[in-house]
Image: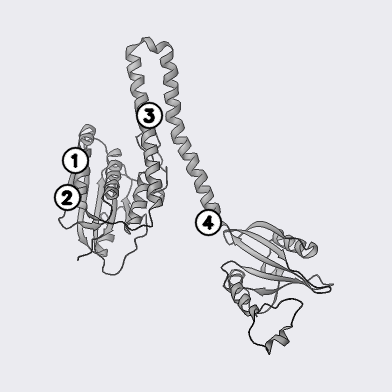
């Protein structure tokens, strides 16, 4: 299909073939390079045919067009789009209409071209892909709805106990102390949620900025285990830490601590009394060792991509529990914000539902990878692998 765009009402293509390249050639090259499908539709005088006289590369690929002019109805069969084009050709007015095609959400825009008396009517048809924008809008709406729900529940609880304490319970010391304790727990829960939301926002803002600094991952893991030891002892859960010596990486120490803290907290949360949570920090591991499955009877699934070059060496952090495990069909959604697997809704266990989302974004910033291995009744293991600090 010809790419040259000729100014209407001036020279003809035959005249222009003998002339030097003009600005029209540059305009044609610009239209050809546009990432969005664009076509020119022509309606000949006294004819009902609507032909595609120009289509850029994106349009030819999207509609599988050949190099010859084609009927519009052979390329586009959506009635709303055809009607909008027909209206633009007939009235000379612009138009637009949303539609779906090839699992994408698109918006068709028609812009009529100026013409001389007796010339064929033409309009430009541009298709704009709004799939990602719509998906982002839905994600924002879902995020606000989930955040509002998570805050509304403890707020309703606190308000209910305040009303109770203003009534008959204000003269009952036992009930008063009990209700005040519950209110304190609920306000702590709201505080954790707000802190996690702010942390997630900060991490997402800087996710494209490479971290700087040296992090001794084994020492960070030791700090986390020391910090959670009292909580683990209270729950009757044992924590075992095994760490190699060569575990230095380039990274942000506070964020690496947050990754290990969230994974250990998550393991403790779902570990029955009398079981063990194991934290392993393995240094100088190759790709084969990183991807090796720990338990062949469990399902292993990567939760993030892990970009790296050939021959890259990694520090691996593995946090394993002996909890109830996770169904295979639930694994892909674990890093979604506020997502909890069935039977693990808010209120049964403390948590904001943002821990693994935070882990995912921190791991992405450090150009590492996050995987999970689990099966019902066989516990779960979360594996983080991070590129090692370069040797100077």
Which residue is painted at 16% across and 58% down in the image?
A: 246
Q: Which quadrant of the figure contains the N terminus?
A: bottom right
| Disc 2 residue crowd, few under 14, some 14–19, many 20+, Cα 10 Å | few
Q: Which residue is mark 3?
A: 187
Q: Nearer the viewer, mark 3 or mark 2?
A: 3
Which residue is painted at 39% across and 13% down in the image?
A: 169
Which residue is painted at 37% across and 41% down in the image?
A: 196
365 over 191 or under it: above or below: below
Q: Which residue is mark 2?
A: 242
Which residue is painted at 66% across and 70% down in the image?
A: 39
Coordinates of residue 258 in the picture (x, y in percent): 29, 46
Q: Is residue 327 visible?
A: no
| Disc 3 residue crowd, few under 14, some 14–19, many 20+, Cα 10 Å | some
Q: Nearer the viewer, mark 2 or mark 4?
A: 4
Tell whether label 4 touches label 1 (CB within 8 Å): no
Coordinates of residue 59 in the picture (x, y in percent): 61, 70
Tell whether label 3 touches label 4 (CB within 8 Å): no
State the SS at label 3.
helix
Q: CA distance from mark 3 to mark 2?
A: 36 Å
Earlier-in-chain disc, 1 versus 4: 4
Q: Is residue 366 left or right of residue 70?
A: left
Q: Which residue is mark 4?
A: 132
């Amino acid at each position: 299909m010809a790419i040259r765009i000729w100014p209407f009402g001036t020279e003809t293509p035959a005249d222009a073939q003998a002339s030097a390249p003009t600005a029209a050639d540059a305009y044609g090259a610009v239209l050809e390079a546009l990432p969005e499908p664009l076509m020119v539709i022509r309606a000949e005088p006294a004819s009902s045919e609507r032909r595609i006289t120009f289509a850029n590369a994106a349009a030819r690929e999207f509609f599988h067009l050949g190099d010859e002019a084609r009927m519009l109805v052979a390329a586009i069969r959506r009635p709303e789009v055809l009607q909008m084009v027909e209206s633009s050709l007939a009235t000379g007015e612009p138009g637009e209409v949303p539609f779906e095609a090839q699992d994408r959400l698109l918006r068709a825009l028609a812009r009529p071209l100026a013409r001389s008396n007796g010339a064929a009517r033409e309009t430009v048809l541009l298709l704009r892909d709004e799939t990602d924008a719509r998906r982002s809008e839905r994600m924002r709406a879902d995020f606000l709805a989930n955040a509002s729900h998570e805050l509304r529940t403890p707020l309703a609880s606190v308000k209910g106990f305040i009303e109770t304490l203003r009534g008959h319970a204000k003269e009952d010391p036992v009930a008063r102390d009990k209700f005040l304790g519950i209110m304190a727990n609920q306000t702590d829960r709201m505080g954790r949620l707000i802190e996690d939301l702010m942390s997630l926002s900060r991490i997402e803002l800087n996710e494209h900025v490479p971290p700087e600094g040296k992090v001794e991952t084994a020492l960070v893991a030791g700090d986390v285990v020391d910090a959670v030891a009292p909580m683990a002892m209270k729950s009757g859960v044992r924590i075992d830490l095994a760490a190699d010596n060569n575990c230095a990486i380039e990274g942000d120490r506070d964020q690496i601590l947050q990754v290990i803290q969230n994974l250990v907290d998550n393991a403790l949360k779902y570990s029955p009394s009398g079981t063990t949570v194991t934290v392993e920090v393995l240094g100088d591991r190759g790709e084969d060792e990183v991807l090796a499955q720990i338990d062949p009877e469990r399902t292993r699934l990567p939760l993030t991509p892990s970009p790296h070059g050939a021959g890259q060496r990694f520090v691996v952090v593995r946090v394993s529990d002996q909890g109830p495990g996770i169904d295979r069909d639930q694994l892909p959604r674990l890093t979604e914000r506020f997502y909890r697997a069935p039977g693990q809704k808010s209120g049964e266990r403390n948590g904001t539902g943002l821990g693994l989302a935070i882990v995912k974004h921190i791991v992405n910033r450090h150009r590492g990878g996050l995987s999970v291995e689990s099966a019902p009744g066989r516990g779960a293991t979360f594996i983080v692998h991070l590129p090692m600090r370069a040797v100077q």
